[in-house]
Amino acid sequence: MPYPLRIEYPALTNAQLTTIGDRYGHDPVVRRLVMEVQALRNLVFRAHQVAEAAGPGGRTDAFGIAVEALHRELEAETWFQEDLAQREAYRAALPKEPTPQDRRAMRNARKW
């Protein structure tokens, strides 16, 4: 990982955070910290959406460098990779629907 704090304190997995919440969640301070962690995770997901919308790296301006650094750091976050894997598994389990282009072609074929 890129910085010493993460070497000393590796990222917690989703299961570890759930265990902490279940075991110590009766304490208002712990509950508040767990909620703060969740809020920060939501912020990370939003930053990831922006980085994905920016497209692949290769830009040499400040934004491109920041996006590339964000991608590198998110690769090291176990909880983030777990959540992405769960989302991809969910999407893969959904029934395959025709794309908008396929639907348009089917509509046009029915007209004639």
Image: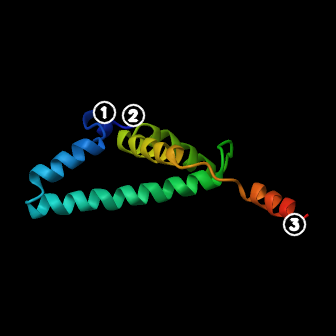
Instruction: Measure the alpha-carbon separation of dots 1 and 2.
Output: 7 Å
Cα distance in 3D space between marks 3 and 2: 58 Å
In this rendering, does residue 14 appear at all?
yes
Q: Residue at x 54, y 56 (%)?
A: 49
Q: Which residue is mark 1?
A: 7
Does dot 3 land on a helix, a strand or a loop? helix
Q: Which mark is residue 1?
A: 2
Residue 2 rendering spot, x and y as whole percentages: 41, 36
Q: Residues within 10 Å of mark 1 (few under 14, many from 20)?
A: few
Tell me which label, 3 or 2, sits earlier in the chain: 2
Q: Residues within 10 Å of mark 2 (few under 14, many from 20)?
A: few
Asked if marks 3 and 1 touch (Cβ < 8 Å), the reply is no
* Badge 1 element: helix
Marks 2 and 1: in contact by CB < 8 Å? yes
Look at the image and tell me whether residue 62 can be seen: no
| Mark nearer the viewer, 3 or 1 | 3
The image position of residue 43, as x and y in percent, is 42, 60
Q: Amino acid at mark 1?
A: Ile
The earlier-in-sequence mark between 1 and 2 is: 2
Identify the residue under disc 3: 111
Question: Which residue is drawn at the image coordinates 11% and 64% (left, top)?
Answer: 28
Residue type, numbered disc 2: Met
- In the rendering, which numbered label is found on residue 112? none
Who's the residue at 27% across and 61% down the image?
36
Which of labels 3 and 2 is toward the front? 3
Give the side of residue 67 with respect to residue 33, left or right. right
Of the numbered discs 3 and 1, the one sitting upstream in the chain is 1
The C terminus lies in quadrant: bottom right
**Amino acid type for the residue under numbered disc 3:** Lys
Q: Secondary structure at mark 2?
A: loop
Report the Cα–Cα distance between label 3 and label 1.
Answer: 63 Å
In the rendered image, which quarter contains the N terminus?
top left
